[in-house]
Image (cartoon, helix red, strand yellow):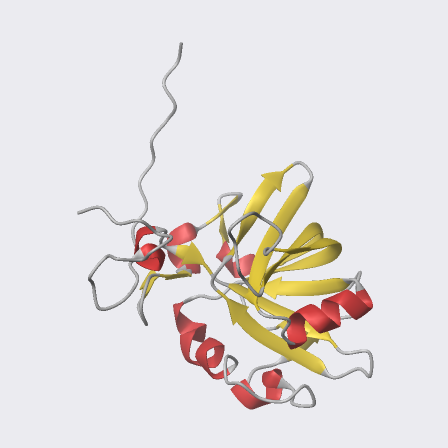
């Protein structure tokens, strides 16, 4: 089959785009409001965009509390979501007002960051401390009508729980990270294989 995405005439029950671009890592973004209220929300359009310097991005469907807080403070944290944290992550996605602390709502522990004024999920195997570089509206392109915004940030600090390090390397199977698929589906990393690059 083929369909024109400008028309979305695919004939399926749901748009398959999110199924095809998957699995996507989940950015569990935490920030603080100008008044000091912590916010925590999962974003499935999240990824690393560079390694040197370490840069990450996430996009928000509309100007939500996370984006407002980051715009005001210039910083945020991103906690890794693994299988054990799936229910807490899901609870933190509940649509609530800006005065609600989703750490408390999800029943997880709020840990202070070291370099920025934000918190991260203490139970998470790893977390990134991030400094805002730019908030990019995604409606400035010809033919695009969108409320989405992309947040681009530099990773300035990383927390890793020592128990997930084996022989000097992070153990991807033990981390058991969640990835977002399409629809309401998720996947967990429980098998890893190695492919060395061919030599010229």
What residue lies at 60% left-to-right and 73% top-to-bottom?
A: 121
Residue 30 versus residue 174 in the image, above or below? below
Q: Is residue 178 visible?
A: yes
Q: Is residue 119 visible?
A: no
What residue lies at 60% left-to-right and 89% top-to-bottom?
A: 104
Describe residue 199's horizontal placement relative to residue 62 as left or right: left
Task: Using the image as rendered, state which of residue 7 and residue 98 is in the foreground.
Answer: 7
Describe residue 179's horizontal placement relative to residue 59 as left or right: left
On the image, the x and y values in percent for residue 49 come to: 58, 43
Where is residue 99, by image quadrant? bottom right
What residue lies at 50% left-to-right and 79% top-to-bottom?
A: 93
Residue 151 versus residue 118 in the image, above or below? above
Which quarter of the rendering shows the C terminus?
A: top left
Residue 22 versus residue 122 in the image, above or below? above
Q: State the residue lying farthest toward the left.
A: 1
On the image, the x and y values in percent for residue 79 come to: 58, 65
On the image, the x and y values in percent for residue 176 come to: 39, 60
What residue lies at 66% left-to-right and 36% top-to-bottom?
A: 52
Where is residue 82, by image quadrant? bottom left
On the image, the x and y values in percent for residue 88 come to: 47, 80
């Amino acid at each position: 089959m083929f369909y024109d995405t400008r028309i979305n005439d695919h004939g399926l029950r749901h748009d398959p785009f999110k199924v095809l671009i998957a699995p996507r890592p989940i950015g569990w973004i935490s920030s603080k409001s100008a008044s000091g209220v912590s916010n925590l929300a999962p974003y499935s359009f999240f990824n690393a965009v560079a390694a040197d310097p370490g840069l990450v991005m996430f996009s928000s469907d509309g100007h939500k509390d996370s984006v407002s807080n980051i715009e005001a403070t210039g910083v945020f944290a991103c906690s890794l979501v693994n299988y054990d944290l799936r229910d807490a992550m899901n609870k933190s996605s509940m649509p609530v007002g800006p005065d609600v602390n989703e750490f408390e709502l999800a029943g997880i522990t709020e840990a202070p960051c070291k370099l920025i004024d934000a918190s991260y999920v203490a139970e998470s195997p790893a977390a990134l401390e991030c400094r805002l570089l730019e908030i990019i509206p995604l409606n400035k392109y010809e033919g695009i009508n969108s409320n989405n915004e992309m947040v681009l940030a530099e990773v300035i600090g990383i927390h890793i729980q020592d128990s997930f390090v084996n022989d000097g390397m992070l153990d991807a199977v033990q981390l058991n990270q969640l990835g977002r698929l399409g629809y309401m589906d998720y996947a967990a990393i429980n098998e890893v294989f190695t492919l060395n690059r061919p030599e010229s």
